Image (cartoon, rainbow, N blue to C red):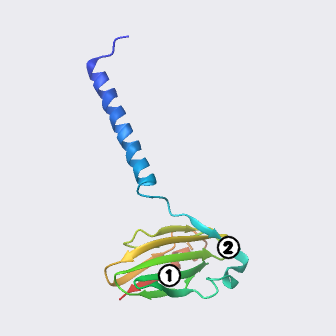
Amino acid sequence: MHIHVYEKTILGLTLVILVAALGAIGGSVFAGHAHLPGPVMRVDPRTVAQTPPFDAPGVQQLGPNHYLVVMTAQAWSFNPTEVTVPAGSMVTFQIASVDVTHGFLIEDTNVNLTLIPGYVSAATTTFSTPGTYLIVCHEYCGLGHQAMYGRVVVQ
Ligand code: CUA
């Protein structure tokens, strides 16, 4: 079978691009440890409020510049609604839903989680610029969904 030289060139280029793209994905997963944000542990949604650390939601200091923010999500609010962290700090969020599926997106950051009842979702980010960052629920969770938001105050 005769294949035109242009067709061979395009096929060759396609193969090169495909191998390069697969290599980039493989490299970021295995060498760069890139992964989708996912559930870190399970929790009974009926007893979240009595289960540590969700029995005392809020901000805890983990290290010199590392903070843990523990939150619960319920229709239609986050608890606590507002947290304050120092500028330049690394902040790990651990959030669990006590009722239905909610979303957790912090504007201008890489934090974007889905909160599935029964699972704890976590993400870590660094807030280098002081300001107020809006947290929004981005999964439709009922009549008050559009009013479900919170704030991270970075000082
Ligand atoms: Cu919670 Cu939408």
In the rendered view of the protein, which quadrant contains the N terminus? Answer: top left
Q: Nearer the viewer, residue 59 or 116?
A: 59
- Circle 1 sits in a helix, a strand or a loop, which is it? strand
Left-right relation of 144 to 129: right
Q: Which mark is on residue 68?
A: 1
x 39%, y 44%: residue: 23
Label 1, label 2: how far apart the Cα atoms are: 18 Å
Q: Nearer the viewer, residue 121 or 143?
A: 121
Quadrant placement of the C terminus? bottom left
Q: Position of residue 22 (x, y in %)?
A: 41, 43
Q: Is residue 37 above or below residue 68?
A: above
Q: Which mark is residue 43?
A: 2
Q: Is residue 76 visible?
A: no
Amino acid residing under circle 1: Leu
* Residue 119's disc number: none
Q: Tag 2 or tag 1, which sits nearer the N-term?
A: 2
78 left or right, relative to 67? right
User: Where in the image, quadrant-wise, is ligand 1 located?
Assistant: bottom right
Q: Is residue 27 left or right of residue 13?
A: right
Q: Dot 1: few (<14), some (14–19), or many (≥20) neighbours within 10 Å? A: some
Percent position of residue 69, x then y? 51, 82
